[in-house]
Image (cartoon, rainbow, N blue to C red):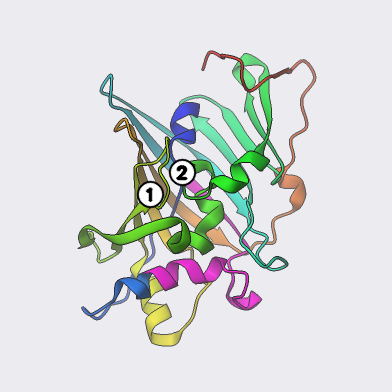
């Protein structure tokens, strides 16, 4: 499951939709998706944090095995005080099929495996330069998607319910991402086109990441809550007594 998370990532929820005109341009959908996460967007229209429940399905192509997990996720973006979209703080808590936590304060990342009494602690700064190449940084770089990816319509322009399907291919070759399919909430796009409003609802309903070996990770988000003023302490990890800190380069039994 941990490996599936690293070769995945990212995005989120299902809202009742409004009817959209049939002439929606690709640029309209991209603008509705990126605008809430851009530093230059006025703060009242930014998404500065979100929390959600998620369901994850990870398929390993070489053995034809699919594993399902679920849990909760929290993200906090720093767009209000910086000129460029930075790496966000995040906390992924898996409840099934096994309990684990993946936490970052924007500088350090902790992968905590309670069952093994181990935590992997690593410097996440090396990932800051990998937006568009690493699924770990995908959600953090939502304001810069068109910079990091070539974006086209998916195999179908819309999916069931009328939500939009985008196909993202990294502009630079990535060993972790061949493509990402993103389902964008039609309600968010409609509000953006008709009223120029952004930041009220999270724009992503789900993502499907495919790596160069045809492994796939799907994440679907439910019950998304935005702009709750999440505390910074939520994104810190305090190592429990008796838990071993493990070098990220060591082989571990997941």
Give the residue displayed 77% in from the left and 15% down from the top.
Answer: 242
Residue 219 seen in the figure: yes
Residue 30 image position (x, y, % from top left): 39, 68
Instruction: Place residue 250 in its image quadrant.
Output: top right
Residue 238 x, y percent position in the rendering: 78, 32
Stretch of the chain drawn in magenta: 30-54
Residue 1 can be seen, yes or no: no
- Residue ID for mark 2: 9
Q: Is residue 231 above or below residue 92?
A: below
- Numbered mark located on residue 153 in the image: none
In front of the other: 209 or 175: 175
Residue positioned 33% across, 34% down in the render: 212
- At a point 42% along the width and 36% down the height, the residue shown is 176
Q: Is residue 211 magenta?
A: no
Q: Give residue 86's quadrant in the image.
A: bottom right
Where residue 173 appears, x then y in whole percent? 40, 43
Check disc 1 and report the residue beneath it: 207
């Amino acid at each position: 499951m941990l490996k599936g998370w690293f070769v995945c990532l990212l995005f989120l929820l299902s809202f009742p939709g409004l009817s959209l005109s049939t002439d929606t341009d690709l640029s309209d959908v991209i603008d509705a998706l990126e605008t809430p996460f851009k530093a230059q967007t006025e703060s009242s229209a930014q998404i500065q944090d979100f929390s959600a429940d998620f369901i994850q399905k990870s398929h390993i192509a070489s053995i034809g095995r699919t594993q399902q997990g679920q849990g909760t996720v929290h993200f906090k973006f720093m767009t209000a005080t910086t000129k460029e979209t930075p790496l966000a703080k995040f906390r992924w808590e898996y409840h099934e099929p096994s309990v684990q936590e993946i936490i970052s304060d924007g500088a350090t990342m902790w992968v905590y495996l309670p069952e093994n009494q181990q935590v992997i602690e690593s410097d996440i700064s090396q990932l800051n330069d990998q937006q568009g190449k690493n699924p770990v940084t995908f959600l953090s770089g939502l304001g810069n998607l068109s910079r990091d990816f070539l974006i086209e319509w998916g195999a179908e322009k819309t999916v069931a319910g009328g939500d939009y399907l985008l196909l993202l291919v990294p502009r630079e070759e990535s060993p972790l991402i061949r493509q990402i399919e993103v389902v964008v909430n039609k309600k968010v796009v409609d509000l953006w086109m008709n009223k120029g409003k952004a930041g009220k609802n999270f724009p992503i309903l789900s993502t499907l990441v495919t790596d160069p070996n045809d492994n796939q990770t799907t994440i679907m988000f439910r019950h998304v809550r935005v702009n709750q003023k999440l505390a910074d302490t939520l994104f810190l990890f305090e190592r429990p007594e008796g838990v071993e800190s493990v070098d990220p380069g060591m082989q571990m039994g997941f």
